[in-house]
């Protein structure tokens, strides 16, 4: 308890590194990091394509296909994160970029991974501070409200609803010297082009799908509730819609079921976990002890399933950056003992009421 946070960090890094090295020595297959990454990448994409084929020929239900795809794309997210840290094919750019393109293609609602690399490195350097734009864009540090819940899954909607506030914050940080002119220029480029060419069009497909079925749903609910006038009103509204809408929704339904909806659910699970396991606002810059907690309460298991146990293992990554995600899963149990021994928080549920502050109350 008498150790400083800097001493705790050094000790945690040393001990978790020792655990990693022991696992690697005992399991020679862990040395083939490139092959393992490519193998997991190939199996994940094959599993997704299998679900797509099954749904299209009618042997998979929409719900089963959506949850299946959401699970495997959570593994692709972990691969993308490792690729951003250049843990696979660092010296072979063709294979490295091919994998980056693949994980983005099957998770097309996310930020361009080549652009994300810049803000993710910034996140590690400034985690928990106002300039950590990566976590701030996922609602980290925002008091819980309907708006936070609504925008947890949807990066585009979150950006649109909070764009004015975020621009103001970036301007203030620039004036305070927290951002350079080059960094502000980079952020502007990411904002304008980061969700192109796939993300923005697919978001509008999603919104139009929801809009159409909101009309259909209200018509059905009106009949179920016995509200004849309501039912007639919605039926009339539907009848007046262009016939092309019906053909359009029929055409985009497979796209929604197999690509958009699974990624929306996966993103909700991931963003909910990550934005609440990271602390914000009263974190000392560079103090890794204060940056994250381990969030692995039993009741979070349904969310952890679709972000590949992120809440349980991501804190390990903040201390030991260069281990791939599957190794973090293998060493989680002994690594947790190390983290507990040096005072890293576990399941600090109070963060939900403190707007993710490490110590203080949420801002007024």
Image (spheres, rainbow, N blue to C red):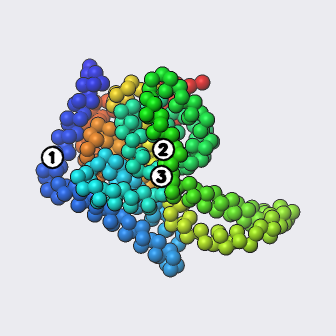
In this orientation, which residue lies closer to the viewer: 6 or 2?
A: 6
x, y (%) of residue 60?
A: 49, 74
* Number of residues whose C-alpha sits closer than 10 Å to that of mark 3, classed few (under 14), some (14–19) or many (20 or more): many
- The CA span between labels 2 and 3 is 12 Å
* Number of residues whose C-alpha sits closer than 10 Å to that of mark 1, classed few (under 14), some (14–19) or many (20 or more): few
x, y (%) of residue 78?
A: 36, 52
Q: From the viewer's perspective, tell me whether residue 193 is left or right of residue 164.
A: left
Tag in front: 2 or 1: 2
Q: Is residue 303 above or below residue 5?
A: below
In percent of the image, x 42 and y 46: which residue is there?
A: 115
Tag in front: 2 or 3: 2
Residue matched to label 1? 22
Residue matched to label 2? 190
* Number of residues whose C-alpha sits closer than 10 Å to that of mark 2, classed few (under 14), some (14–19) or many (20 or more): some
Q: Quadrant of residue 219?
A: bottom right
In percent of the image, x 43 and y 29: which residue is there?
A: 180
Residue matched to label 3? 110
């Amino acid at each position: 308890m008498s150790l400083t946070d800097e001493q705790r960090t050094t000790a945690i890094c040393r001990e978790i590194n020792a655990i990693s090295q022991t696992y690697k020595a005992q399991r020679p297959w862990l040395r083939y990091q490139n092959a393992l990454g490519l193998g997991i990448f190939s199996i994940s994409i094959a599993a997704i394509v299998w679900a797509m084929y099954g749904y299209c020929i009618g042997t998979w239900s929409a719900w089963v296909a959506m949850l299946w795809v959401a699970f495997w794309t959570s593994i692709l997210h972990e691969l993308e994160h490792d690729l951003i840290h250049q843990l696979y094919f660092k010296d072979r750019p063709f294979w490295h970029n091919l994998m980056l393109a693949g994980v983005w293609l099957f998770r097309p609602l996310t930020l361009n991974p080549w652009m994300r690399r810049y803000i993710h490195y910034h996140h590690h350097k400034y985690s928990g501070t106002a300039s950590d734009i990566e976590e701030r864009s996922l609602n980290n540090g925002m008091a819980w409200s309907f708006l936070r819940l609504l925008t947890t899954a949807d990066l585009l909607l979150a950006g649109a609803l909070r764009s004015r506030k975020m621009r103001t914050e970036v301007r203030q940080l620039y004036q305070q010297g927290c951002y350079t002119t080059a960094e502000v220029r980079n952020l502007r480029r990411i904002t304008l082009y980061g969700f192109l060419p796939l993300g923005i069009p697919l978001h509008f497909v999603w919104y139009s799908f929801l809009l159409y079925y909101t009309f259909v749903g209200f018509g059905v609910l009106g009949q179920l509730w016995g509200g004849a006038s309501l039912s007639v009103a919605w039926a009339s509204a539907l009848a007046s819609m262009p016939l092309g809408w019906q053909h359009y929704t029929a055409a985009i339904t497979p796209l929604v079921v197999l690509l958009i909806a699974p990624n929306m659910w996966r993103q909700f699970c991931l963003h909910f976990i990550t934005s609440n396991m990271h602390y914000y606002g009263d974190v000392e810059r560079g103090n890794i002890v204060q940056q994250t907690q381990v969030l692995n309460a039993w009741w979070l298991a349904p969310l952890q399933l679709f972000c590949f146990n992120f809440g349980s293992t991501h804190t390990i990554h903040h201390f030991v950056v260069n281990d791939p995600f599957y190794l973090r899963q293998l060493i989680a149990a002994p690594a947790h003992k190390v983290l507990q021994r040096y005072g890293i928080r576990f399941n600090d549920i109070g963060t939900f009421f403190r707007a993710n502050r490490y110590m203080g109350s949420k801002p007024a």
